[in-house]
Each structure stands twice: as structure tokens, then as C-alpha cells.
Image: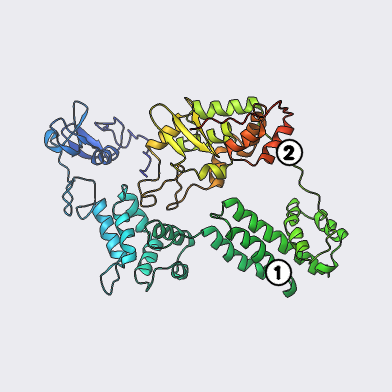
């Protein structure tokens, strides 16, 4: 990222720049006048076609239009000695792309043999072909990144387990792991499952007694891990809930140990005392108690008052309209966030479902933009379609090696991954609460059509939509089963 311009200083630099007119240090005198260091940098990065037909860097100015060195008379070294192309040079008369290639070869080649492991060749090629090679050089020259890549180059095998053993920050390890997976050097695995397994191993050390540690281990293995292993992909929400459920269960077991109570001795008054004497998160023990009951570890008569549904705030119709107005008709949010916001505000979609959309679910043609939600394709009318059109034209995060062939609509910074739901929620929070918006939208939609059709079209369970229909006092006279075939 370019450094911001300093404030113009006519006292220190009385002669203004011949291009921008501001008072900064003059670093070059070209035929069109003195040039400050900001305009000098910009000139080296200006690409296009000169009036003479030359394609490449156009550092000069003729009548205000960019021009090549020959036409403008500008003296500037932009010829890479390695590849011969015109480009901004980094050092040693090498362009950024060639410098990046040299660094990649140095770091990913085994110093004893001078050969890059076959598994690393696709990764090396992807790094060398980055569109923004200056970002690649900046990233790879960081000491911890260079050290990690050197260790990887001499590893006897390239496996997930070996990667876990290499020294270095987890953030660097996870990013490089993502590159290896995305470019076929490693098989894909569910990282959230692995992260939970590793976290749970450490969490078990917090259990006070061996007996309760065995119970907690069984709860983790046969309930939480088992459920995650049955999923094709574990959502971020499931990962976070599993950690929370584990934490609450361990705190409950430790409380029982501190009070000299075994699970078989647990009574309703003990459970009530636990719930009353602590934060509201203790109520999440309602996920542990049913499992313990099913395993015959506790009295089956134990009860916990269920969470009251329908108490979460929801956006009113006027608030929804105002949020849509801000999202569609202002540039307050970047285009990616605007496209996601429309799916939440208009179609009542969960953030977790939005971020998992692929371009197989979205069709963008001249006449219409359609999005498949649940079992139905919806056409986005103008101007709701504009953010998705812009996103299709420039999906973002395509200047590095992270997304060579990504099909995600909402690409994330991690290689081959979509954006995180928590990150998207946080950004949209500046305009609206995604949960309140989704609930408000479903509340209004149930006034307009039958529960089965709304549930089927939007990908919800009918009982979920039925609860919203009851809440909105919606009454239906008949069920219409016709759905237009795409």
C-alpha cells in the first residue's frame, strides 16, 4: 500500500511540483518540469498505450496525456535486466516480478540439492505469477515467513502433521497451509475440526478430578466431535458453540467437584444453584445435561427452563427499508458487503449461508442477475443487482496466489476460503444487525405467502417459518403449491 502524501510544505520546498502543483521535494527534472517523489513514483507505475503505439510504462506527459520515454524525452530506467520488460524496478535493475521469482527459488529450493520438492513446484509457480508481485516480495521477505519457507523446503515430506511441527507463528503456518492445499500440495481437511480437537485436548487439563475428566472426554468425543465429523464442512458457528459447550461443561463439573457432589448425586436444587450463582452463559449447560441423561449419568428428572424463542430484537419494516436504502443507494459499504447485505435484508438469509455461496449459485447476464437460495432461483431487480454485477466483474483477492481458481462469491483473505461470518457481521453492524435484519425480514415475508413455499424457497425448515408466521399473526386461506420452474 502506498504511503499517504505528506502535507504540502511551501516553506521548506518553495518550488512546486510541475505535475501535482504541491510543494514537496523535487527528485527529477523532466521536460515537463520538476517532479516530486510522489509523482515520480506514479510515473513509474503508469501503464498504457502511447499515441505513437508503444505499449508499456508511460512516465512522460505531452499536453497532459501520458506518453512513452521516446516521445516525451523523459530519462528513466525502467528496463528489467532479467526479463527485459518495462516495469518499475525493485533493486539491481530487476523488476518486482523477477525479484519475487528469485526469492521464491531461494527459499523453496533445498540448499543441499538446489532442487525444489515436486509438491512445492505448483506453489512456487503460483507465488511467482502473482499479479501484485510487490506485495509478494513484501510478504515473503518478512523474517518469520522466510524462515518458515526455508524449513518447509528441507522437510523430508510435505504433510499436515509435518507442517504442525515446524516452528513459526500459527498465522503464517495456517496461511502457507492454505496455499499448499489450494495448489494441490496437501489434501484438503477441515481446519476447524482440527483446531477444536487441539483446543479440546488442552481444555481437558482444566478438569479438577480424574473421574470428571473422563466424563468430559466422553462428552467431547461422542457428542461434540461426533457431530462435527458427520458434517461435510463445519461452520464457524458450530466450532464456536462446541468450544462454549465444552467450557461450560468443564466449569459445571469443576463446580460439582468443589462442592463434593458427584454426577449420580446431582439433584435439581444443585443445578438451580449453579444456574443462579453465575453468568447467563451457564444456561448452556442445557446441552450437557441431556447428553448426561441419555448416558444415564444423572437423574433423568433434572430440568432446565428452555430459552424463550421470539425474544430477540428484529428490525421493523421502516428500519428495513432505511437499511436497504443505505445499502443500495450509498457507497457506505464496499461492493462485496453490499451484495451480502442485500441477501440478508431482502431474502432473510443466514450469514453462514451467504458466505458459502459459489458462482454456481449466481448467474449474471446482461438482462438479469439470479441467485439460487434453497431450491429456488430469485431474480434481483435493478438496482439490487448492481453490487452482484460489480462483484462478478471484480471478485477481489485475486492479486495474490490465494485464489487461483476460487469459485466463492465472497472470497476471504485465507487461501481458497470464503470470508468469515464473524468478520462480515462486524462490518455490516455499522449499518444494521444481521440477526435483527434477518428476523425482521422473515417476520414480514410470512405475511405475504404460505409457510411451505417460503420455507422451501429460502432454504428454511418449515417449523422455523411457522414460528415466524405465528409471531406475525399470519393466517392463510389456502396452500398454493405452484412454483415457477427455472
Residue found 15% across the figure and 33% down from its top: 31
Residue 340 lies, in percent from the top left, at 51, 37
**Which of the pair 283/140 is nearer the observer?**
283
Quadrant of res 76? top left
Using a 10 Å C-alpha cutoff, classify the residue at mark 1 as few (fewer than 14 neighbours), some (14 to 19) or many (20 or more).
Answer: many
* Residue highlighted by disc 1: 207
Query: Can residue 437 be seen in the rendering of this structure?
Result: no
User: What is the spatial separation of the Cα atoms under label 1 and label 2, in whole angstroms?
Assistant: 36 Å
Rendered image: mark on residue 71: none
Q: Is residue 303 left or right of residue 155?
A: right
- Image spot of residue 460 (x, y percent): 62, 40
Q: Relative to 484, does residue 79 appear above or below in the rendering?
A: below
Mark sitting earlier along the chain (1/2): 1
Percent position of residue 30, x then y: 17, 36
Nearest-to-viewer mark from 1 and 2: 2
Please say if the residues under marks 1 and 2 sit with CB atoms less than 8 Å apart.
no
- Please state which of residues 426 and 307 is positioned toward the viewer in this rendering: 307
* Position of residue 358 in the picture relative to residue 294 (left or right): left
> Vertically, is 258 above or below 447?
below
Q: x, y (%) of residue 444?
A: 65, 29
User: What element does badge 1 sit on?
Assistant: loop
Q: In the rendered view, would you say 93 is above or below 196?
A: above
Q: Which residue carries the number 2 mark?
A: 310
Q: Residue at x 67, y 62 (%)?
A: 223
User: 22 above or below 114?
Assistant: above
Amino acid at each position: 500500500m502506498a504511503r499517504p502524501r505528506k502535507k504540502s510544505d511551501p516553506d521548506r520546498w518553495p518550488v512546486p511540483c510541475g505535475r501535482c502543483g504541491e510543494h514537496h521535494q523535487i527528485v527529477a527534472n523532466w521536460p515537463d518540469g520538476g517532479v516530486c517523489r510522489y509523482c515520480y513514483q506514479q510515473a513509474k507505475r503508469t501503464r498504457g498505450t502511447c499515441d505513437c503505439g508503444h505499449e508499456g510504462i508511460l512516465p512522460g506527459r505531452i499536453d497532459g496525456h501520458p506518453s512513452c520515454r521516446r516521445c516525451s524525452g523523459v530519462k528513466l530506467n525502467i528496463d528489467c535486466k532479467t526479463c527485459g520488460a518495462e516495469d518499475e524496478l525493485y533493486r539491481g535493475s530487476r523488476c518486482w516480478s523477477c525479484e519475487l521469482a528469485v526469492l521464491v527459488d531461494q527459499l523453496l529450493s533445498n540448499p543441499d540439492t538446489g532442487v525444489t520438492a515436486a509438491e512445492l513446484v505448483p506453489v512456487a509457480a503460483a507465488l511467482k505469477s502473482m499479479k501484485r508481485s510487490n506485495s509478494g516480495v513484501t510478504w515473503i521477505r518478512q523474517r518469520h515467513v522466510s524462515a518458515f519457507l526455508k524449513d518447509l523446503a528441507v522437510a523430508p515430506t510435505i504433510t499436515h502433521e509435518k507442517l504442525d511441527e515446524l516452528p513459526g507463528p500459527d498465522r503464517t503456518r495456517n496461511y502457507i497451509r492454505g496455499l499448499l492445499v489450494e495448489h494441490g500440495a496437501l489434501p484438503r481437511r477441515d481446519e476447524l475440526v482440527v483446531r477444536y480437537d487441539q483446543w479440546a485436548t488442552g481444555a481437558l487439563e482444566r478438569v479438577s478430578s480424574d473421574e470428571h475428566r473422563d466424563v468430559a472426554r466422553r462428552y467431547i468425543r461422542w457428542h461434540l466431535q461426533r457431530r462435527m465429523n458427520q458434517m461435510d464442512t463445519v461452520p464457524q458457528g458450530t466450532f464456536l458453540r462446541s468450544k462454549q459447550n465444552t467450557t461450560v461443561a468443564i466449569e459445571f463439573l469443576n463446580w460439582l467437584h468443589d462442592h463434593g457432589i458427584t454426577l449420580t448425586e446431582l439433584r435439581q436444587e444443585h443445578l438451580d444453584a449453579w444456574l443462579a450463582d453465575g453468568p447467563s452463559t451457564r444456561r448452556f449447560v442445557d446441552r450437557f445435561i441431556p447428553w448426561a441423561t441419555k448416558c444415564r449419568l444423572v437423574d433423568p428428572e433434572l430440568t432446565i427452563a428452555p430459552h424463550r424463542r421470539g425474544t430477540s430484537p428484529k428490525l421493523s419494516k421502516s428500519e428495513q427499508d432505511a437499511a436497504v436504502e443505505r445499502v443500495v443507494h450509498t457507497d457506505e459499504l464496499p461492493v462485496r458487503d453490499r451484495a451480502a447485505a442485500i441477501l440478508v435484508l431482502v431474502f432473510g438469509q443466514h450469514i453462514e449461508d451467504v458466505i458459502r455461496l459459489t458462482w454456481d449459485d449466481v448467474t449474471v447476464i446482461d438482462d438479469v442477475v439470479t441467485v439460487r437460495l434453497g431450491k429456488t432461483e430469485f431474480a434481483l431487480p435493478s438496482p439490487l443487482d448492481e453490487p452482484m454485477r460489480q462483484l462478478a466483474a471484480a471478485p477481489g483477492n485475486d492479486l495474490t496466489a490465494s485464489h487461483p481458481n476460487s469459485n466463492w462469491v465472497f472470497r476471504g483473505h485465507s487461501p481458497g476460503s470464503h470470508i468469515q461470518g464473524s468478520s462480515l457481521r462486524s462490518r455490516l453492524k455499522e449499518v444494521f444487525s444481521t440477526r435483527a435484519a434477518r428476523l425482521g425480514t422473515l417476520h414480514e415475508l410470512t405475511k405475504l405467502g404460505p409457510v411451505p413455499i417460503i420455507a422451501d424457497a429460502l432454504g428454511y425448515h418449515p417449523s422455523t417459518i411457522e414460528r415466524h408466521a405465528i409471531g406475525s399473526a399470519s393466517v392463510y386461506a389456502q396452500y398454493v403449491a405452484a412454483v415457477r420452474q427455472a
